[in-house]
Image (cartoon, rainbow, N blue to C red):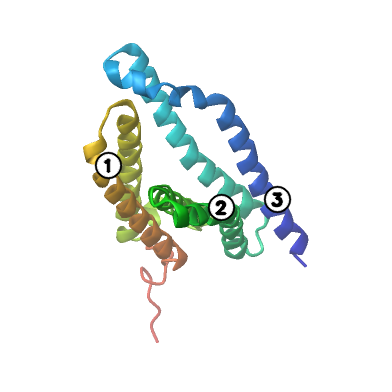
Amino acid sequence: MHSLSFILALAAGCAVTIAWQFANNLVFPPVFHNLWRIRQHAWTAVAVVHFSGLLLSRASVFGLCFVSAWVVTRVHRAHQRAVLVAFVLALTAQHIPWLARLVTDLLGNARFATYLEYEIIGVLFQGVFVLASGLWAIRTHQFSEMNRSTRWLALLVAGQLLAGAMIFAVSRVLDLSPLRPFAQISSLVQFASIAYLALLLWKRPVPIGPDSEIAHPQTN
């Protein structure tokens, strides 16, 4: 009965993603150009412009994940979680050919291991963030009504995303090669936090409010 809206929801989410990719390829490539020259003059106005552009580029990725998940869960309301998981799988599937190519290249040259590692982390991060964003979008209670652990974890994830965006931008503008392992650890911590947030949101925690059974327990 709901197959048409299910397919339309997936198509809408993919359309949003394609539109973002097109706009991203028009707007943000200049901020990635000639970064090696920017590193030689890191405290100039040009470097600040590139730094701001890199931050906006990172923020646009987070915005895309949330907006696409929101669109998918709004177009198909009958089975929001099912269509959200299907959308995450569709986003992941589009990276399979590139991952397969990197694996093939790795067999001939070990230097492709770094590229493969970054690509796998990026795919997993996108998938879990879209899942958490979609579950957040379809929650039935407000932030203040959520249990304490979920609220604190959501604030922690927001702080980690901000810190990760700062590290991403700074590492591109400045030569911070010695801090690269720290950036990788930070990405893994963010992934674990977002995955745990998605798990908490998936469990549908019961809100604590004046109308809840906990506030007004029934007596026999």
What type is the residue that disc 3 sits on? Ala
Sequence-wise, the earlier of marks 3 and 1 is 3
Real-space CA distance between mark 2 and mark 3, rounded to the nearest whole angstrom: 17 Å
Residue 182: x percent and y percent? 24, 45
Real-space CA distance between mark 2 and mark 1, rounded to the nearest whole angstrom: 24 Å
Sequence-wise, the earlier of marks 2 and 3 is 3
How many marks the image carries: the answer is: 3
Q: Which residue is mark 1?
A: 180
Q: Residue furthest top?
A: 45
Q: Residue furthest left?
A: 178
Disc 2 element: loop
Disc 1 element: helix
Mark nearest the camera among 3 and 1 is 1
Residue 89: x percent and y percent? 58, 60
Residue 215 in the image: above or below residue 76: below
Q: Is residue 118 left or right of residue 1?
A: left
Query: Which numbered marker is on residue 11?
Result: 3
Residue 120: x percent and y percent? 44, 54
**Residue for point 58% across, 59% down:** 84
Q: Which residue is mark 2?
A: 95
**Residue for point 56% across, 31% down:** 24
Disc 3 element: helix
Q: Residues within 10 Å of mark 2 (few under 14, many from 20)?
A: few
- Callouts 2 and 3 close, C-beta under 8 Å: no
Residue 172: x percent and y percent? 34, 30
The answer to whether one can see residue 209 in this image is no
What type is the residue that disc 1 sits on? Arg
What type is the residue that disc 2 sits on? His
Sequence-wise, the earlier of marks 2 and 1 is 2
